[in-house]
Image: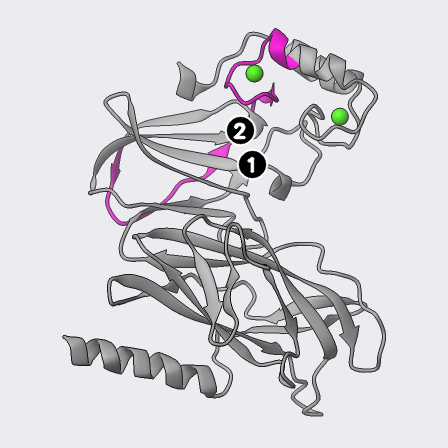
Amino acid sequence: MKMAALIAIAGITLGMTTAQHDADLLFGRSSNRVEVVQPQPHPVRQMSSVLGRFILDVGMDFYFDYSTGLPDLQFCRVQQVWISPGLVGSKSGFGNVFCESGCRNFFDLPTGGTPHHHFIFAAQSPGVYVWDVRGVNAVARGGAALQDMPYAYRVYMVAGNPLRLFGAVSPASGYQGNLYDLRLTVQLRQGGNTLAQSTLPPNPTAIYPYMVGFNQPAGTYTVVAKLSKHLSRRVNNLNLTGAHTRNWEFAMLGDINGDDVIDDADLLQVLFAFGSNHFEADVNGDGVVDDADLLIILFNFGAVGEGAQ
Ligand SMILES: [Ca+2]
Ligand SMILES: [Ca+2]
């Protein structure tokens, strides 16, 4: 047992010093902005169980043009945008670089004279973990400054074999903002009790706009999903074992204080922020708090989310 673990660690160490893996994030350029050239989208990655932890080797490098053998870039900063609680990315000699709080959460390519680096991501318990990054401050091979990536590139990491739900997330038709600015929370309930929940920004550029995992036994569950500014949706008596597709459509917009009811509290919040660009009070996500936001709340006034009924 101990020998097997040591061999596994040796394999990971070897992996850190060898050439590019298929799943390495390769940063290059797309016209005048920096881009993760491949893999697009990132495949769902299974973490390995080693010494009671779950770990995954994630590599990054510049994209090298096949015909010239030259990299697209001179420089790129890999900036974390979101990471799941409990997930930590570390690197020998650098310690913990990526985590929810207390880490620097960026890494510059090149560092130490090379753009090719590997990180070990680790988690303690089974689940689905998310790591979102953007390439920023990039400089092209010829010296031109490139625009930052306008979206977040997502890596899903699966630890163990949790119950998984994944699929699409549709906001209400009146919502004009960026879906990534909102938060999706998925709850697993049984007999009126919430047993587990997971929150993440939906990401339409990822292999699945959302995927969540729950360290719970197979069984029959009620699943409730809530999207910021929208009322929740509920599906009763879902028989869950392994992984399931579940697409969510959030038709009711207007719950800006997050209590799953559209009422005078939401109305007051809009009135107090009227004329500003306050994010929370901007119901339709068009960047300004005005009568359009007020009308959405009045139109849906009194509605209650399915998860609160
Ligand atoms: Ca409300
Ligand atoms: Ca608005």
Say which quadrant the C terminus sits in. Answer: top left
User: Residue 179 appears in which quarter of the rendering?
Assistant: top right
* Within-10-Å neighbours for mark 2: few <14, some 14–19, many 20+: many
User: How far apart are labels 2 and 1 at the CA level?
Assistant: 6 Å
Between residue 1 and residue 301, name the one nearer to us: 1
Which residue does the numbered mark 2 point to in the structure image?
Answer: 250
User: What span is colored magenta in the figure?
Assistant: 238-266
Instruction: Name the residue at the bottom extreme.
Output: 68
Hey, what amino acid is under mark 1? Ser
- In the rendered view, would you say 5 is above or below 273? below
214 drawn magenta? no
Is there a contact, CB below 8 Å, between mark 2 and mark 1?
Answer: yes
Between residue 292 and residue 138, name the one nearer to us: 138
Q: Where's ligand 2: which quadrant?
A: top right
Q: Where residue 207 sits: x, y (%)?
A: 50, 56
User: Residue 113 appears in which quarter of the rendering?
Assistant: bottom right
